[in-house]
Image (cartoon, rainbow, N blue to C red):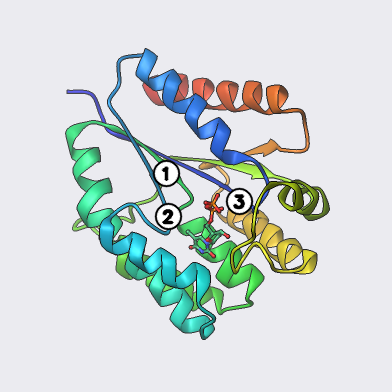
């Protein structure tokens, strides 16, 4: 049986990851793989309800972090673990790095507490931690991201934060990359859509080749 694969996509709001996730899905489908395309917070009926709350209701920083991890726990148990066990490719629009970047970097919530919650929620029976094997990080200057977002849609609770919030989120992602260098692939999201798409394709193919070797 083919081995399940777990890939996450990250970046500040406005970095443009959604279009590229769809392209990666196509790449795997063409290779004959079964895909689970999902997102956080969300991915199960209960986790989608939690998403609604956390994206639209003002709340205490610990409450926010706990709800992100509560939604993640459901998502892992109901969707991600079964998919990996079947040998599917799980493509996840955001995962735990977003909690470190937004709640840790952006909100200034304690990094060590987040690390404890991460272990509680993503711990496996053998003591290892469930993590994506590859995290594609769309890195972008918050000022460029803000311009893109302004043109695009009505902002939610996070999207309406000021640019310095996103500078702190970006620093949070950079810190996570420094802590997990082999898992992270940074993409320069300031490039044209086509150039970003080409980079994403290259990163995923290179990683697949390495993983198969
Ligand atoms: P996003 O993934 O950008 O979806 P959409 O493109 O539909 O807006 O929105 C999710 C928001 O939730 C985004 O602003 C980041 C935030 N978020 C956190 O703050 N912490 C988390 O752990 C996750 C997964 C997301």
Question: Is residue 102 in view?
Answer: yes
User: Which mark sits nearer the N-terminus, 3 or 2?
Assistant: 2
Label 3 beta carbon less than 8 Å to ligand 1:
no
- Residue named by callout 2: 40
User: Which mark sits nearer the N-terminus, 1 or 3?
Assistant: 1
* Badge nearest the viewer, 1 or 3: 1
**At 63% from the left edge and 53% from the top edge, which residue is drawn?**
178
**At 27% from the left edge and 33% from the top edge, which residue is drawn?**
4
Q: Decide: few, some or many residues near mark 3? Use Cα within 10 Å; few <14, some 14-19, many ≥20.
A: some
* Badge nearest the viewer, 3 or 2: 2
Q: Is residue 100 above or below residue 193?
A: below
Residue 129 location in percent, x, y? Answer: 34, 56
Total of numbered circles in the picture? Answer: 3
- Residue named by callout 1: 92
Q: Is residue 5 above or below residue 44?
A: above
Q: Which mark is residue 177?
A: 3
Q: Between residues 15 and 182, which one lies in front from this camera angle?
A: 15
Q: Between residues 33 and 205, which one lies in front from this camera angle?
A: 33
Q: Secondary structure at mark 2?
A: loop
Q: Give me the C-alpha separation between circle 1 and circle 3.
A: 17 Å
**At 71% from the left edge and 38% from the top edge, which residue is drawn?**
189
**At 71% from the left edge and 60% from the top edge, which residue is drawn?**
171
Q: Give me the C-alpha separation between circle 1 and circle 2.
A: 7 Å
Q: Confirm or deny contact between disc 1 and disc 2 (CB under 8 A).
A: yes
Q: Secondary structure at mark 3?
A: helix
Label 2 beta carbon less than 8 Å to ligand 1:
yes
Residue 115 location in percent, x, y? Answer: 45, 70
User: Which mark sits nearer the N-terminus, 1 or 2?
Assistant: 2
Rendered image quadrant of residue 199: top right
Q: Confirm or deny contact between disc 1 and disc 3 (CB under 8 A).
A: no
Q: Give me the C-alpha separation between circle 3 and circle 2.
A: 19 Å
Q: Decide: few, some or many residues near mark 2? Use Cα within 10 Å; few <14, some 14-19, many ≥20.
A: many
């Amino acid at each position: 049986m083919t081995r399940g694969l777990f890939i996450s996509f990250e970046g500040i709001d406005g970095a443009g990851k959604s279009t590229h996730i769809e392209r990666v899905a196509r790449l795997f489908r063409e290779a004959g793989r079964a895909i689970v395309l999902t997102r956080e917070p969300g991915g199960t009926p209960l986790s989608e309800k939690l998403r609604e709350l956390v994206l639209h209701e003002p709340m205490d920083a610990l409450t926010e972090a706990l709800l992100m991890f509560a939604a993640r726990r459901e998502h892992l148990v109901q969707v991600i673990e079964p998919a990996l066990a079947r040998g599917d490719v799980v493509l996840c629009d955001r995962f735990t790095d977003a909690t470190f970047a937004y709640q840790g970097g952006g909100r200034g919530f304690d990094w060590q507490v987040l690390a404890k919650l991460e272990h509680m929620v993503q711990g496996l029976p053998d003591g290892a931690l469930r993590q994506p094997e590859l995290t594609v990080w769309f890195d972008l200057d918050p000022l460029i991201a803000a311009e893109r977002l302004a043109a695009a849609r009505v902002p939610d609770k996070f999207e309406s934060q000021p640019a310095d919030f996103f500078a702190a989120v970006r620093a949070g992602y950079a810190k996570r990359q420094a802590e997990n260098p082999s898992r992270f692939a940074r993409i320069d999201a300031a490039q044209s859509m086509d150039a970003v798409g080409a980079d994403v394709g290259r990163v995923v193919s290179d990683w697949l080749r390495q993983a198969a070797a």
